[in-house]
Image: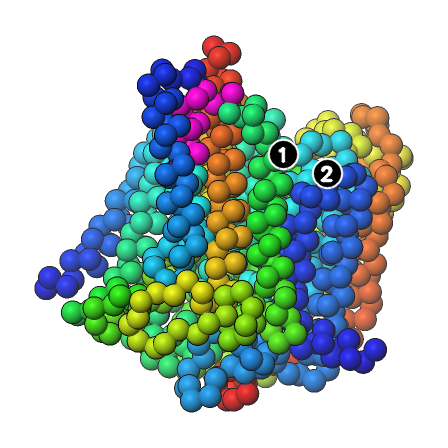
Amino acid sequence: MSEMSKIVRTISNSLFPFIMIYGLYVIMHGHLTPGGGFQGGAVVASGCALMLVAYSSEWVFKKVKESNLSVLESIGAIGFISLAFLGIGVTFFYNFLVGSNLLFGEIPPAGPNTGNLNTAGLLPLMNLSVGLKVIAGLFAIVAVMAFVASRGMRKK
Amino acid sequence: MIYNIPFIAVVLLILVGLATVIFKKNLIKIVIGITIIESGVNLFLITLGYRENSVAPIYTFAPSTKMVLPVPQALALTSIVIGVAVMALMLSIGVRIYRSYKTLDVRKMRRLRE
Amino acid sequence: MVDIIDVLLTHGPALIIAVPLFGAFLTPLISRLNDKARNIFVIAVMGLTEFIVLLLAYDIFTTNGVHTYTFGSKQPLLTLPSGYLVPVRIIFEIDGLSIFMGIIAVTLALVASIYSWSFMRKEDGLDKYYTLLLLLTTGMLGMVSTGDMFNFFVFLEITSIASAALVAFRVNKGESQEAAFKYIVLSSIGALFVLFAVAILYGQYDALNIATLANRIRYTFLDKVALVLLVASLGMKAGIVPMHMWLPDAYGEAPASVTIAIVAATQASLYALIRMCFTLYGGITSVATIGWILIILAMASIFIGVTMALLQSDFKRMIAYAAVAEIGYMVLGIGVGLALLFSRTPYSVKAIQGGIFHIINDALDVGLLFLVAGAVFYATKERLLDRLGGLARNMRYSTIFFIIGALAVAGMPPMNGFASKLLIYESTYQVSPILAVVAILASILLLAVMVKIFHSAFMGPPLVKAADVPKTMLIAMAILAALIIFFGLFPNIVVENMVKPAADALINQATYISQVLGGV
């Protein structure tokens, strides 16, 4: 697929940071509002697909090599499993950050309240890992399919 | 009666999806049929949690404490993620089949007989 | 030292899925270093998993107990937190039958990874192959250990996605892509119907835990609908006729080391069918109807499997149809046990023991035959029986392994197939003599199929050039052959120590429920 005109490329350049910020907002506030790892990751991957359509898919695929995406995906996955393993002293997947004074350790009051980002222990960290893995995975799927399709059309 | 409409919609979606998988001849349409079945099952999961006069089960700025069940929503979310993965795999295999058989008609893919 | 064993036993149910999953996520990073480092890492992770599974098996078989594990709670055994009357977290519950299937799954996966060292050495994209193999092991072990219905659905989907991607691994051939597409479409529809049944049961009883559901279930109309959907979908995944259409294509077109892993996945689905029929719906007296339906489907599987095997001309498809017939024998044993369960005859326990013993025998026999077929393909690049001939001159070890596997599949005395098939014949004769006669005749026809393959591929004039296969493939086949001969010569040891606790754990539904609901 060849690249689109200058108007499309300029507007995509301006829109992509907003899409990325919104996606990261959805990932980080997964324990307060609807959202979480997969939903926010899918939003950012849609933004990346927008860039893939605006610029030609061969150019994007050559700049972001497939091995880099594979490394990002592995980092997200290993982060998730390591966080689950850290509580193995008590049980697997134990939420050891809740109630302690470390990173996300406050306990919110029961009942309806205004949301506090500093709560829920291990969940925001796991949301981040899953979000990173989903971004890399979905972007790799879309990019490889577009690259294969453009190569097939070129051969004809 | 009006609270039965989602369940009727579930049955209709699953029947339409099954009819698409059985009767259509294009590979991509079979994949779309499986997606329709998955939408029907997800709708069934979410409808099971409904309670009357209730709000979404989120405590941040909640208007009241009477809420629908949150567990089926988590189950439906997991099912949607699995559906995305399966659809990506089926479409990749479809691309490979097109490259090798030069057609997407399932009646012509009969190299593996008996 | 005793402390480490204690920790491994307490956290065992979590470690058997965490260790292969961690290995699967680390494999793409390690394969950037070196090929050999990746192979050694994969075999090390599989070996560690096998060690933990065997440790758990030793503990469960000698004490006849049930290990539970609650994820994310303050103690691993705390299934009911203080003040609660229902379990609220995901609970793994491993009893005798679960760990029996776990041994089969992880042993076959370990043999597959040893065999792949030289079998797949010349292929491309091997880091993804080993990642998928480890993910398949995680899925199978999770499917047999879980005590939660929705968690079972998630592991079922992990297993089917990983095995479909592995079947399509050789991307240049069109036939393997067609087989993988059929497999993933049927698998996906089956799994969605399992989810539909889980949703029906959740909507009625507000519980996802198998023990809680078994405690609360009444046999209403919706429960019957859920039972029909579960039996049909899990029977499709287990390869029972008339839902077996994907099985010869998938087993025949996958690389040989992948086929042996998919055999384990098929048997894990058969375990799930048994678990649903005996434990979830076990307290109801009309399970005899389900038993009779399973008997009819089993006889159809045996008959169709054997007759279709005689018509094939491809080495691996013949063995795949023989595998369909063997699944028929397993389901026959289980069906007879289910039909006689409430009528208090001693033959019901014998039938269930025969069916369960046949699961491990079939895994070893059919696995060895598929590995020999892979070795023949590696040496000669041929799969049609018309073009093979005279291989016994140069491939001596492979011929010996084929003879051992063929005698075991046909049920000849010094091998393990005879012991389990004798138990099935004896108990089927009590139900109806005609069924036993048809089963014995099918065994003789299976021997005819094996003789046909042996004569056309290994005897006769040499039509192709062949050299014997590399050592790691021979080591993998030798492990399976040694286990076959050991189980055949000493079936008493196996039945007393492994099969009897598994069958007892299956019939005792009350123990299963009280481990979760009874307390800490």
Contact (CB < 8 A) between labels 2 and 1? yes
- The residue identified by callout 2 is C32
Q: Residue at x 41, y 86 (%)?
A: C85
> Which is more toward the observer, C45 or C261?
C45
- The residue identified by callout 1 is A67
Q: Secondary structure at mark 2?
A: loop
Q: Position of residue C441 (x, y in %)?
A: 62, 57
Q: Position of residue C309 (x, y in %)?
A: 61, 44
Q: Main secondary structure of the magenta part?
A: helix
Where residue A79 sits, quadrant-wise, is bottom right
* Residue C322 visible: no
Taking C492 as reference, is A4 above or below it? Answer: above
Range shown magenta: A46-59
The residue under label 1 is which amino acid type? Ser
Q: CA distance from mark 2 to mark 1?
A: 10 Å
Q: Badge 2: few (under 14), some or many (20 or more) residues near its Cα, within 10 Å? A: few
In the current view of this chain or complex, which residue is farthest to the top? A156
